[in-house]
Every structure is written in structure tokens, then in C-alpha cells.
Amino acid sequence: EVQLLDSGGGLVQPGGSLRLSCAASGFIFNNYAMTWVRQAPGKGLEWVSTISGSGDTTYYADSVKGRFTISRDNSKNTLDLQMNSLRADDTALYYCTKEGVVLVGPIYYYVLDVWGQGTTVTVSS
Amino acid sequence: DIQMTQSPSSLSASVGDRVTITCRASQSISKYLNWYHQKPGKAPKLLIYAASNLQSGVPSRFSGSGSGTDFTLTIFNLQPEDFATYYCQQNYHTRPWTFGQGTKVEIK
């Protein structure tokens, strides 16, 4: 069974740091890019960061660039998100997601086809 | 960044109804459009990819259409388990991949 287990969330003061982790199982981890998506309380979904299957390429939302670092360990099938200089507006439920690729005709499309259960980050004094 | 706008933000419907949700992109995204739904307290789940292709295991009462800037998700014969929040998401070329603000489908 394909599964993602998010962990590492908690309560942290503004300016503090937190490291989220995601344990993957049931698929060939290094074949897939992985993405973090967050959801502030009562709000919609926000793409945060993506890392390629090899780990060589990373992408960040402008709102977290320079503060968050995404990384992966393909030998352990784990994905991490190091979050520094946390702000109140980083408070959210953070989801680890697997980025699938589907071929429709001659074109590849990307999907977030597997989601973790989410881990909650609360930034408050 | 590409902005995604969904309408309506919420709607009330009855079991058996047909429901239509629209999603508009701020620029053409061809068919690089996915739909997800999210039930309370649960993670989102992929419903439709590439604008009109049903994800494996998703009931055929869900249907997607559109290309360019205008897209539609239709739910035929609404079932009790379909009451949820629906999000569109574009994955056109490079990041950031943006989501619509969501449409909450509630029981009338």
C-alpha cells in the first residue's frame, strides 16, 4: 500500500525553527518528486515546496523562500522540511504529497496523487 | 504567478442534484488542471487530472471539462459522500502550482 506518514509538527515561538518529516512506503521513492502543501486554519491549499526525485532540484513558494529548506534521503525513503524564522502566518496543517506523472496522449501531466495525513504547525508566543 | 479563481465559494445542494463548479485561470494553462476534493478532517484526494481524466477509483458521476482558462467540474447525481470542499489546481510548466480558493458543497 502506498503511504505517506507526516510527523514533526508542534507549537513553536515566532522566529523559531521546526523540522517536518515524511516517511514514504509502497512505491519506488526516488522515482518521484515530492511536494509539501499547507493549509492554514479554515483556509485553502497552498503549494509550499517541491524536490525532484534525485534531490538535485528544489522549488519554493515566495512566502517561504530563504526560510524553508526541503530535502530528501532516498536511502531511507524520507522527505524533510526544515523551517526557520517561523512566523504566525506559517501556522498551518502541512501535508507531504507524492507527485505522480500521467501520460495523456503525447503530454505528461503532474498530479498530487498521494497525500499524508498532515502534521500541524502552530507559531505563537 | 498564475491565479486560479473558483466559483461559487459555496453552494447548497440535495442528494441526487447535479452540481457544477467553475475554475478560471488568469492565463491560458491548456489542460494542465487538476481537481481535488477534501472532506472535513481529511487530506485532499485527487479526482480529475488533465482537465477531464478521471483518477482511478473515482466514480463516473464526476466529470471535468475545459481548456485554456475556463474549466468545469460537474457532479451528477450528488451522493452523501460528495459533500466536501473542491479545489482546482494548475500545473502549467514551472512552479508555483496554484490552487483555487475552494468550493464548499453543503447539504441543502
Image (spheres, coloured by chain):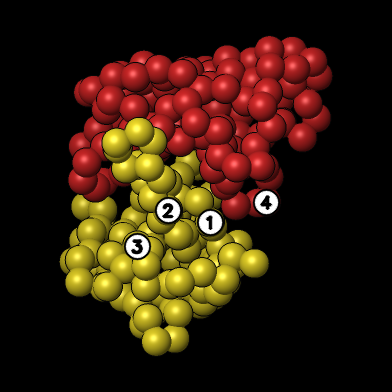
Chain colours: A yellow, B red
Quadrant location of the N terminus of chain A? Answer: bottom right
Host chain of mark 1: A
Of the pair A26 and B72, the residue shown nearer to us: A26
Residue type marked 2: Gly
Q: Position of residue A69 (x, y in %)?
A: 27, 72
Residue type marked 3: Ala
Residue A100 has which mark? 2
Please tell me in which quadrant of the rendered image residue A123 appears: bottom left
Q: What whole-number distance in Å separates the C-alpha atoms at marks 3 and 4?
A: 25 Å
Residue type marked 4: Gly
The residue that appears at 65% across and 51% down in the rendered structure is: B42
- Count neighbours of disc 3 (C-alpha within 10 A) and say few if under 14, some if 14 to 19, many if 20 or more: many
Residue A114 has which mark? 1
Q: Upstream in the sequence, badge 3 or badge 1?
A: 3
Residue position marked by numbered label 3 in the rendering: A33
Which secondary structure, mark 4?
Answer: loop
Q: What whole-number distance in Å separates the C-alpha atoms at marks 1 and 4?
A: 16 Å
Which secondary structure, mark 2?
Answer: strand
- Is residue A125 visible in the rendered structure shown here? no
- Is residue B81 visible in the rendered structure shown here? yes
Q: What whole-number distance in Å separates the C-alpha atoms at marks 2 and 3?
A: 8 Å
Tags 2 and 1 on a common chain? yes
Which secondary structure, mark 1?
Answer: strand
The residue that appears at 62% across and 25% down in the rendered structure is: B62
